[in-house]
Image (spheres, rainbow, N blue to C red):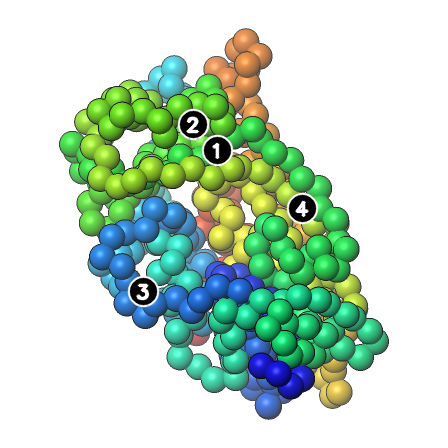
Amino acid sequence: MSAAVDVDVLVVGGGHAGLAFARLLAVLGGGRRPGLSIAVLDAGDAPATAPDAEVGLRVVALSPGSRTILERCAAWPLLPAQRVGPYRRMVVWHPAGAPDGAASIHFDAAGQGVAELGYIVENELLRAALWHAPGGGLQLLPATKPAALAIDADAASVSLAGGGLLRARLVVGADGHASWLRQALGVGAQHRAYGQHAVVAHLASERPHDDTAWQCFLPDGPVALLPLADGRVSLVWSCASARAAGLLALGIPEFEREVTAAMGGVLGGLRLTTQRAAFELAAANAAQYSGLRFALIGDAAHRVHPLAGQGVNLAFRDAVVLAQVLADHLALPHADPGDPLALRRFERARRGENAATISAMSLINAAFSSSVPGLSRMAGHGLALVDRLGPVKARLADMAMGRTGEVPAWVRRGSAS
């Protein structure tokens, strides 16, 4: 790209949040502002249309609310059914007890009046579905790296590393926790490193996973087994960084014994079927989500501990709220998508829920991982108490399934209509 190109909305980052926002805006805003132009640039290559033979190590837990958003994006039907693992139960327990003991909490789909509590999907398959979803009004620019940013009263201008210039009335940062756009804007972020890494791998289990997500809170962090569609389970073991390095260094038989013991043999013996990997865990929240001609969504705006699998769901909720706010705004005559007052409505709608989730996940992780005598055990008793408190338990289930927060009614209803 050598000449300058003008668009209404430019999205920096072609991951889950950026693609979902762009597709939703094309659907919700395109009808209210004919000719609305949206471009998505991403430094990486376009995802393949066909999935790899092996299931990717990085997976996400999608809520029913996120499925509804993906249906509205026309992306859900592109996910191969044989690679989508629905889970209908969730069991969380303290190691002092047992999965079915006093220090545990259980959720099931039937009790919530739904078919599934959520779905385990590979990161790359999800991105590919969003990238290749049908629908017009979108210009996708893979392998395009931004180099410089300038914002004035009329436009946000992004210079490209390979030459050329993109000018937009609104630029949206969706380029991950190390967001280039956030840094180029000079927007700071509160950051907290947990001193933990998450070890991931896929395992075969002696007993079937029974469409259940299993999670045990160990003294140095939670370990979870998430049900995959092919019958295996995906391990996400959050632990102290030194412990994570040790787990990666173990021989395969020793690693299998460690994981089986950590989960209390809930699925019998576990056998490693893939490579192992680890990624650092941290929490963050941007000082602001919006301003003159810019908005931040997803990991570019916030980062949360993965113990409840809410990161991608929060990102999708950012995407749908920003798209809806802009669509409503664009219905007004001569409305400017970069209007900071309109963008402020998005920020007010999302900052509270995101901050509350970040704090709650940090608190839960700290309570169960505490070295203070008795605190972790007290947290375990708290699980049992919540399991018996119907309204509190129902509220937690609603949060996990995307039924809360300031999102459009069609998301809360779980219908794409």
Circle nearer the N terminus (1, 3): 3
Q: Please state which amino acid type lies under the numbered disc 2.
A: Ala
Residue that numbered label 4 is attached to: 285
Residue that numbered label 3 is attached to: 79
Cα distance between the residues tagged 1 and 3: 29 Å
Residue 117 visible in the snapshot: no
Which quarter of the figure is the N terminus placed in? bottom right
State which mark lies toward you, 2 or 4. Answer: 2
Cα distance between the residues tagged 4 and 1: 19 Å
Cα distance between the residues tagged 2 and 3: 33 Å
Mark 1 touches mark 2? (CB < 8 Å): yes
Left or right, 187 with reference to 396: right
Q: What residue is drawn where x is 51% and y is 37%?
A: 280
Q: What residue is drawn where x is 77% and y is 64%?
A: 291
State which mark lies toward you, 2 or 3. Answer: 2
Cα distance between the residues tagged 3 and 4: 31 Å
Cα distance between the residues tagged 2 and 4: 27 Å
Image quadrant in which you'd find residue 373:
top right
Residue that numbered label 2 is attached to: 245
| Residue furthest out toward the top | 373
